[in-house]
Image: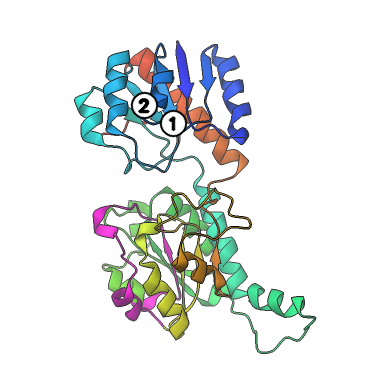
């Protein structure tokens, strides 16, 4: 059995080598992303393991069929960049890593939120000038606030546990309700109810068509004055220009953004000494209380190891047993 892994970063190499040694399976590591040209490197292999934000070319799947490769195991959750019609037509089955570390995502969200509540950006700005005064930058305490969690899957629930630990009131919205949370009376019936009640709104839903730009000028108008918005899920959930306008008007007190709707080609790239090719993103980053990180919520030792191990385990299971609990059913 032989696997080929595409888009491998340095921080993943050690985990892949350890897995290969423990499972006695040959694993070839390739730094290049998977595309219609690099897929030719997969000839003679039994499965492809990949991770990338760019779309997967349809030609990849015709080549996989030609080579007799029936499994594409991706090292992340999202499958919206995979042409499922091409995968199905060529008999390629897809597995993903549905949960590599919910805590990693939730912890970055709360880290950003606490910076905003304790006015860290303001004090950093003052200290840099030698200003050690307190006023007017008085903080807010999380236990006095209501946190609205949109999406109560694994990551949303990890966040809920953290917010509850701080003593905050937590409300949730999800089209698929968790029975335990429902038993606690945590859910509201509509997003409008959540918008009206929440001091903090944190997003943990997928980038499906129904959720595209769910945060926009109309939904922002329904929110409380001084709301804080957190997005560690998908950039497409927020209309960035409307968020920026809401912040500049004072309606939004701050935002924590680990994702951005046009991040592909920007995040995880080095623009030192160069112009960042997105004016809206640049403007967002200039705002004192909008905290931007380049899609790194997942980027912990635990999560990266899990992404590598689970993806390789899934490929092994698909080859040996013809099934995996992580197969994505389209």
Q: Quadrant of residue 63?
A: top left
Q: Name the quarter where the N terminus is drawn.
A: top left
Q: Is residue 209 left or right of residue 136?
A: left
Nearest the camera: 258 or 29?
Answer: 29
Nearest the camera: 122 or 203?
Answer: 122
Residue 253: image x %, image y %?
50, 79
Q: Is residue 135 left or right of residue 169?
A: right
Please report contact status of discs 1 and 2: CB closer than 8 Å, yes or no: yes
Residue 172: image x %, image y %?
37, 63
**Local crowd size for mark 1, using a 10 Å CA cut-off: few (<14), some (14–19), many (≥20):** many
The disc placed on residue 50 is: 1
Residue range highlighted in magenta: 196-224
Q: Name the quarter where the C terminus is drawn.
A: top left
Task: Label 1: state its secondary structure.
Answer: strand
Residue 203 within the segment the image draws in magenta: yes
Residue 235: image x %, image y %?
40, 58
Residue 49: image x %, image y %?
44, 27
Residue drawn at x 45%, y 35% is 51
Depicted 243 relative to depicted 316: above or below: below
Residue drawn at x 22%, y 28% is 88
Residue 208 within the segment the image draws in magenta: yes
Q: Is residue 216 left or right of residue 138?
A: left
- The residue pinned by badge 2 equals 72
Nearest the camera: 169 or 253?
Answer: 253
């Amino acid at each position: 059995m032989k696997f080929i892994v595409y888009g491998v970063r340095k921080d993943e190499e050690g985990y892949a080598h350890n897995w290969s040694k423990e499972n006695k399976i040959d694993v070839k590591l390739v730094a290049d992303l998977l595309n219609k040209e690099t897929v030719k490197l997969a000839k003679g292999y039994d499965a492809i393991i990949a991770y990338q934000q760019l779309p997967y070319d349809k030609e990849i799947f015709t080549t996989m069929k030609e080579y007799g490769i029936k499994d594409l195991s991706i090292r992340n959750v999202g499958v919206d960049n995979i042409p499922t019609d091409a995968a199905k037509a060529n008999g390629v089955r897809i597995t993903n890593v549905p949960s590599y570390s919910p805590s990693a995502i939730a912890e970055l969200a709360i880290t950003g939120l606490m910076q905003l509540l304790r006015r860290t950006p303001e004090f950093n700005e003052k200290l840099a000038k030698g200003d050690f005064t307190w006023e007017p930058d008085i903080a807010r305490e999380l236990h006095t606030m209501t946190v609205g969690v949109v999406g109560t899957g694994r990551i949303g629930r990890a966040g809920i546990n953290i917010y509850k630990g701080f003593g905050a009131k937590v409300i949730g919205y999800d089209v698929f309700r968790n029975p335990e949370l429902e038993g606690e009376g945590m859910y509201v019936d509509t997003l409008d109810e959540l918008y009206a009640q929440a001091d903090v709104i944190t997003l943990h839903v997928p980038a499906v068509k129904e959720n595209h730009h769910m945060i926009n000028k109309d939904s922002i108008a329904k929110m409380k004055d001084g709301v804080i918005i957190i997005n560690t899920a998908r950039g497409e959930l927020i209309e960035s220009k409307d968020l920026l306008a809401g912040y500049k008007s004072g309606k939004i007190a701050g935002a924590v953004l680990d994702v951005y709707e046009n991040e592909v080609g920007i995040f995880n790239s080095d623009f030192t000494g160069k112009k960042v090719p997105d004016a809206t993103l640049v403007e967002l980053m200039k705002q004192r209380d909008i905290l931007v990180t380049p899609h790194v919520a997942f980027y912990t030792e635990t999560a990266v190891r899990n992404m590598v191990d689970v993806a390789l385990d899934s490929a092994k299971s698909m080859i040996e047993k013809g099934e995996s609990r992580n197969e994505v059913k389209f």
